[in-house]
Amino acid sequence: MTKYRNRKGGVYKSDIYSYSIYPRMRSHSNTPINTGEVYTVKIVDVNEKGQGVTKIRGFLVYVFDATVGDKVKVRITKVYRNFALAEVVEWLRHVEEY
């Protein structure tokens, strides 16, 4: 602990976090969308899990139970750093699969 002896105020917070066994909780407040908001979108692709894929303000959003070509109103349920998850509120145009 001799390297911390010259610091005023003791150990810095960054040092505590680097030696902690608990991860830091980071907020994703810099994302362009928020949880609970409702948007009207068109599904442009489907991912490997079968979720519809769209972009809102350049932010990637995965929509449950939607297929390519659907136009739906979605509610954002969860926001992560690089993407968000959404659920369908209302079907505006549904493409029938054959």
Image (tube, rainbow, N blue to C red):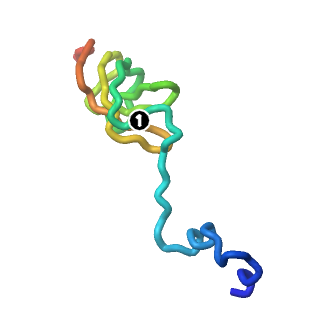
Picture layout, residue 71 above or below residue 62: above
The image shows residue 9 at horizontal and vertical percentages of 67, 75
Give the residue displayed 26% in from the left and 30% down from the top. Answer: 65
| In the foreground, 67 or 39 | 39
- Determine whether, in the image, residue 13 is placed left or right of residue 32: right
The image quadrant where one finds the C terminus is top left
Rendered image quadrant of residue 79: top left
The answer to whether one can see residue 51 in this image is no
Picture layout, residue 78 above or below residue 60: below
The image shows residue 44 at horizontal and vertical percentages of 41, 21
The image shows residue 3 at horizontal and vertical percentages of 74, 82
Give the residue displayed 32% in from the left and 38% down from the top. Answer: 77
Q: Kindly give the residue lying farthest to the bottom in the view shown.
A: 2
Rendered image quadrant of residue 11: bottom right
Q: Kindly give the residue lying farthest to the front in the view shown.
A: 9
In the structure shown, which secondary structural element does the residue marked by tag 1 occupy? Answer: loop
Q: Kindly give the residue lying farthest to the right in the view shown.
A: 6
Give the residue displayed 26% in from the left and 13% down from the top. Answer: 92
- Determine whether, in the image, residue 75 is placed left or right of residue 57: left
The residue where tag 1 is placed is 34
Residue type at numbered disc 1: Asn
| In the foreground, 48 or 54 | 54
The image shows residue 43 at horizontal and vertical percentages of 37, 21
The image quadrant where one finds the N terminus is bottom right
Picture layout, residue 37 above or below residue 77: above
